[in-house]
Image (tube, grey):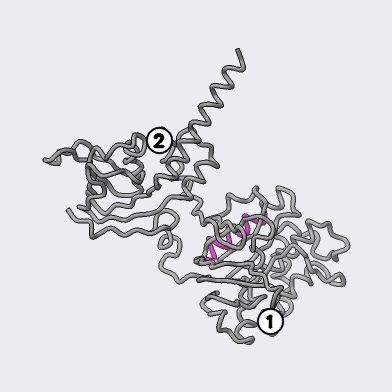
Amino acid sequence: MTDSSITSAAVRFDPSWRKRIGRGQQPAIAARDLQHYYGTGELRKQVLFDNTLEIYPGEIIIMTGPSGSGKTTLLTLIGTLRRAQEGELHVLGRPLHQATNADLLQLRREIGFIFQAHNLFDSLTATQNVRMALELADSRGQRAAQTQRSREMLEAVGLGQRAGHKPKQLSGGQKQRVAIARGLVHKPRLVLADEPTAALDEQSGRTVVELLRTMAKEENVTIIIVTHDNRILDVADRIVNLVDGRIRSDVLVQEAAIVSQMLTRCDVFKHLTPRGLAEMTDHLETETFQGGTRVIHEGDIGDKFYLIRKGGVAVRRGADNEQIAVLKEGDFFGEMALLTGQPRNASVDTLEETILYTLRQEQFNVAISRQASFETEIRTSLFDRQ
């Protein structure tokens, strides 16, 4: 047996997910150690701290966090509306921290902006407002073709019957949909949206997010949405949470759901709420082992809980390494030593290349305490009924 094949990284979930999503492509957005400040001198205030993030073509990212956490600032840096001050930021293959003004101008033609403030021209119809984006992206385009494209885009957001109306003849939600159509009409490679559905009813909001989903999946468009609208969370491939200027978590939604289901098979986690499970998955680390690696040695002090994401392990006991069990994807091990405080009662060897999610003892203890709280609440509730 050998331990030299162990690789460990404190990243969110299965490390192969980036390859699956990116399909071998370069990131559409790559930020490294990104920082940002407002003001100068004694009034200088840092609002972004050491943020590192990769987003791939075709991904839909929902960015959440409290007001003032830096979401909009990060969005405007990616959109070239502010200059990156410290760190590195690449957008659609261009290094923004080194870009000239001409570079930024060219890049903006490949970005679709959707912001809460509609910024529509009152003297122009909905079609004319949308067509402006096409004229800015390609000043030599044919007017008739641009008008037709603008009307098609308004139809796509449910405003075909309002194409000739001016903003004062439209409701707040209709104005927002005109702004959305304007942000998408020139077929951008990257869409940046700040609360795009806040003013929309459920049906209109769903129409918009399904349009964005289609663009991402069929046209490989990268989409970042800053929102507090929990009605549209289902559209996200990943949810990035910012708190106090720092990326607190970066969750692959589908993987989080899979792992949460796996965790509920263990008694320690089965009583956790979905929110509690999400918090536990947020603390998981990933370790990749080659086949024939000893993960746990019998007699060692327990310090981690293990969940098998891919691959398989053999559980062995005694001086002759008698095999007593084989565990596969979705199975778990290592919890008994954490629960009892006793040394490991068996060794564990990988049978093939294996990806494990691990949870350190302090977070495992948090889950135990929450289970105890849950049981106390049940007992109290039953007592009160008597």
Helix, strand or loop under label 1: loop
Q: Is residue 209 magenta?
A: yes
Q: Amino acid at mark 1?
A: Gly
Q: Is residue 202 left or right of residue 33?
A: right
Give the residue drawn at x 69%, y 52%.
Answer: 205
Give the residue drawn at x 25%, y 59%.
Answer: 5
Q: Are marks 2 and 1 in contact (CB under 8 Å)?
A: no
Give the residue drawn at x 60%, y 79%.
Answer: 107
Give the residue drawn at x 59%, y 69%.
Answer: 190
- According to the picture, the residue beneath numbered tag 1 turns out to be 141
Which region of the structure is painted magenta? 207-220
Q: Amino acid at mark 2?
A: Arg
Secondary structure character of the magenta stretch overall: helix
Q: Which circle, 2 or 1, is nearer the viewer? A: 2
Q: Which mark is residue 265?
A: 2
Helix, strand or loop under label 2: loop
Give the image quarter of residue 385: top right
Reading the chain from its start, which is encountered first: label 2 or label 1?
A: 1
Q: Residues within 10 Å of mark 1 (few under 14, many from 20)?
A: few
